[in-house]
Image: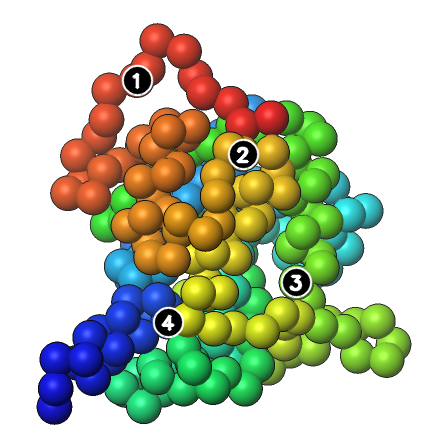
Amino acid sequence: MGLREAAVIVLAFLVAGCAPIVPLAASSPPGSGHHIWLVGHGWHVGLAVERGQMPASRWPESRAFSEFTYVEIGWGDADFYPAASVSIGLALRAAFRSRGSVLFVAAFDAPVDRFFADSEIIEITLSVEGLEALAAFIHDAYAHDPTGRPIVLAPIPYGRGWFYQASGRYGLLDNSNTWTARALQAAGCPIDPARTATAGMLLAEARRFGRVIRGPAGETAPARAETPRCS
């Protein structure tokens, strides 16, 4: 295998997304404020929200999880993202010949930093308008059947929820991380999705306007004098 072929394979794995770290179960009162969280899962970044703060009128599908406190959302390739085991072939097909996309939705009750006890986490503060725009963005990511219902495809590895058929075409530079960046941009955050093709790039961009709850090595960052805000 030549250097060019090896580089393509590595890059494909880098942006295709992967199965997230299985979180620890815990129970604690929910937080307060208009916060959302980025959750680092190795090669891709999930977006966690407090379900009760998200307007159901803009994200009607969220009513399916009304008994839960938090929801994590992700978007990715229809074959690679739900796969129990991944391969070079799946990664390359996701990057260059994707056959569709899925929306990952997982509901849970434990605080985000406890549920994802081993993950890098960045907290981002939004305005009410930002939350509404984010909810609308997530709603638009669902594909719906002729009756208007979301299309369930497969179970998820943790929490309560499903992989749903999604809108949008997955590709090498239009992947799970750039989708999350577009969600942040829709919510009013100063981020350029073109600079977020990898999880590391996305998290680095988010540190400019978010508060690091847990860094990549598991350390807790000191609080800032002023809490940054996106919108």
Q: Kindly report which numbered mark, 1 or 4, lies closer to the viewer in this rendering.
A: 4
Residue at image position (45%, 52%) is 194
Q: Amino acid at mark 3?
A: Ala
Q: Circle 2 is placed at which residue position?
A: 189
Mark 2 and mark 1 lie on one chain; the one further toward the N terminus is 2
Q: Quadrant of residue 167?
A: bottom right
Element at label 4: helix
Q: Kindly report which numbered mark, 2 or 3, lies closer to the viewer in this rendering.
A: 2
Q: Kindly report which numbered mark, 1 or 3, lies closer to the viewer in this rendering.
A: 3
> In the image, residue 124 lies at what x, y percent?
47, 32
Crowding at dot 2, Cα within 10 Å, few <14 / some 14-19 / many 20+, comes out as many
> In the image, residue 66 lies at what x, y percent?
67, 51
Mark 2 and mark 3 lie on one chain; the one further toward the N terminus is 3
Q: Amino acid at mark 4?
A: Ala
Quarter of the image containing the N terminus? bottom left
Answer above or below: position of 136 versus 128. Answer: below
Cα–Cα gap, marks 2 and 3: 19 Å
Residue at image position (50%, 83%) is 98
Q: Circle 1 is placed at which residue position?
A: 223
Residue at image position (55%, 50%) is 182
Q: Which mark is residue 45?
A: none
Q: Are marks 3 and 4 in contact (CB under 8 Å)?
A: no
Crowding at dot 4, Cα within 10 Å, few <14 / some 14-19 / many 20+, comes out as many
Q: Which mark is residue 16?
A: 4
Mark 3 and mark 4 lie on one chain; the one further toward the N terminus is 4
